[in-house]
Structure formats: C-alpha cells, structure tokens
Amino acid sequence: LEPTELFLRKSGGELATRMYTFTDPGGNKVSLRPEFTASAIRYYLERADTEPLPLRLQYCGPIFRHDEAQGYRQFHQTGAEIIGAAAPESDGEVLALAWEGLALVKTPSPTCVVGHVGVLHLMLEAIGLSHRAQAFLIASLPRLKQDPEESRRVQEQAYSLGLMKSAENVGGSRLLVDDMEEKEALDLLQDLFHDPLSGLLGSRSMDEILTRFIQKLRGGDDPQRVERAISLFSRLASMSGEEQQALPQIRSLLQEYGISPTVLNPLEKVLASFHRRCPSASPTIDVGLVRGIAYYTGMVFEILAPGPQGTLTLCGGGRYDGLVKALGGEKDVPTLGFAYTLETLLDLLPEKLEERHLTSSNPQRR
C-alpha cells in the first residue's frame, strides 16, 4: 500500500481510473501499488540525506490494476532504477541491462524500440511553440501514429483548448498586449471597459475578469506554427525502422521543415552509449514512441517479441528527470529505469509455450 497521492502526482492522473483505491481505518486514502517507480522514488526521498548518488535500485513484486477488457489484474514486475545519473551514459546502461537480461531467458526474436521525448520537445521549441502546446502535441502522437487523418481533429482540439490564437488575435492587438506589463494592460482595459462592465460582473471582480482576458490573449500559440508542428508530427509518427535507415529519413524531414538535425544529438548519444555495451544489437528508432505517460523527459524504450497471439511488450522504461521534485524532493534529480512483466517473460520460455495451451483455461493462472 502507498498513499494514493504518490501515484497521482507521478502519473498526472493517467492511472487514476485503473487503481484500487480506498480509505484505510485511519482515514487515509491509499492504493494498491499499480507500478513501482513512484515507490522507488519515495524510498530514495526517505533516505536522500544518507544515500550516495548515483543510487541503483532493483525491485520485484506484485502490482495491481484494473483493465477494461480483463477486469481485476494482479501481475508481477521486476525492474531497476538509477537515481542521480545523467544522460547519455546511464541511458545506455539501462538499455543494455534490459536487453541483456532478456538473453538470460532466451527470449525469441526480441526487438528494442527507442525514442526520445526530449528530442520531440527540441523540435517543437525550434518551431516556436509554448510548453503547453508542446505537451499537448506530444501526448497526441499515439493518435497521429495510429491514424494520420487524426491531424485535423488534433488541430480542432488544440483550438478548443485555447492552445491556438484565434485569427483576430494574431495581429496588432496581440502584439500590443504582449509588449505590455500585465498591470499596464490591466489599467488600460479597466479604463476602456469600466462602464460597460458595471453591473455585469456577477461574483467575480472586474480585475479577475480582465486578468483572465489578458491571459487568454497571451495564452495561445500562432495557428500557423501549431499547424506546422502537427504536419511535422503526422509525418514523423509513421517513421520507424532500423537506425541506419530511420535516422537519415528523419534528418531529411527536419531539414524540410527548417529544423536543424542537431536536435537529434541527444538520441544519437544514447544510441552510441548503448552500442558500446551491446555492439551486436540493432535497435529500431521510433520517434513517435512516447509510452503514454506524461512524466517522461528523455529517452524512452520498449522491448517487443512475437507471441502466440501477436506482438508482446516484454519491458519498457525511460528517463524522467523531473519526477523526484514532483514527488516531494527539493530539486530535480536525473532518474531513469525500466521494468519487465514477469508473467509475459515466463510464458515465452520454450518449456512454457506448450504448457500455456494446457493451462490457459485455468483461472488460477492469473
């Protein structure tokens, strides 16, 4: 059991509907552990004054989630975290550890897929998007990857969320407000709108209404920049393949959009670190891989393998340098890790494949 807030602060609410949460006899809101990373960071924070960095932790145990298709699920994860180690060397270390660990169980035909959330942010910064717009578009990548036609719906959603300025606000009025201090803009709007707003404010003061109006004028991005970023991501989402093939294609696409290929340097350094440890490995590059969890900040990866009923995800992980502070630390500490799902690994063992067909109908298998 852990405090529910620990997992909500870590995942941004993405696991909220899948956790088993209740109030304990002391009135505390607690949850069965849905994953290990937050617990590992909590362990470090309790010992931060005495533990030297980098700190390497290994864990194994049950986790509990609700699945819409399967209902209640209890399964086991084993994994590792490195706390206090910066990229790219530690990224290569984690990738190598995850990759070589699968060799011990002789996993058939695994594929290591590598992406980099930090590189995606650099691309969008080069286009000139705000952090809010960057977060939205990166979170939209899985949709664009699944269906390129989603680009129009992503654009409509960006507008409805206030991430894009309306056409009438992309002219001089926007520049006037942007160039002013907020107090100056507020004073000007008060002079302009004091009489018309009298009696229409309801429970909010005129200052509150006008301050929100200023924030809205400033809050959206240039629509042309957002549309350009969506176009880029729609094309990037479908680009994946072996390193020697994918990276030149991505560089060419970036040049087409006027973005320096040097934004790929963080990813290339991670791959170089991985190759030094595992020279025979041939990873797949997929910049559309974001793993659906908001706290990743750098390298992300998954290791896949063919299973009896389709492709299986054997493990996944990445870098989340802001997580320590988000969970109560005094400052950001570079952190990364990964986890295997043990049941999936065991079912792929050669001696288990035949047994699986004999026992799949047994509910105790779960």
Image (spheres, rainbow, N blue to C red):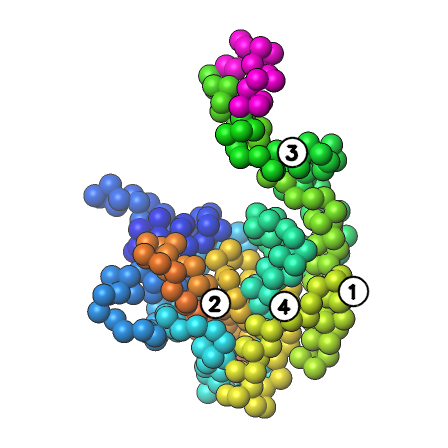
Reading the image, the residue beneath label 3 is 176
Reading the image, the residue beneath label 2 is 319
Give x and y (percent) for residue 52: 27, 74
Alpha-carbon distance for marks 4 and 1?
14 Å
Reading the image, the residue beneath label 4 is 263
Left or right: 12 as drawn, with respect to 325: right
Left or right: 265 as drawn, with respect to 13: right
User: Callout 1, which amino acid?
Assistant: Glu
Mark 4 against mark 3, which lies toward the viewer? 3
Element assignment for label 1: helix
Q: Residues within 10 Å of mark 1 (few under 14, many from 20)?
A: few
Reading the image, the residue beneath label 1 is 256
Give the magenta range: 187-202
Residue visible at 34% across and 74% down?
54
The one of 314 and 9 positioned closer to us in this rendering: 9
Element assignment for label 2: strand
Label 2 with label 1: CB-CB less than 8 Å: no
Alpha-carbon distance for marks 1 and 3?
33 Å
Quick one: label 1 or label 3, which is nearer the N terminus?
A: 3
| Magenta highlight on residue 198 | yes
Quick one: label 2 or label 3, which is nearer the N terminus?
A: 3
The one of 258 and 348 positioned closer to us in this rendering: 258
Chief SS of the magenta region: helix
Mark 2 against mark 3, which lies toward the viewer? 3
Give x and y (percent) for residue 262: 65, 71
When asked about the image quadrant of residue 342, the answer is bottom left
User: Callout 4, which amino acid?
Assistant: Val
Alpha-carbon distance for marks 2 and 3?
40 Å
Quick one: label 2 or label 4, which is nearer the N terminus?
A: 4
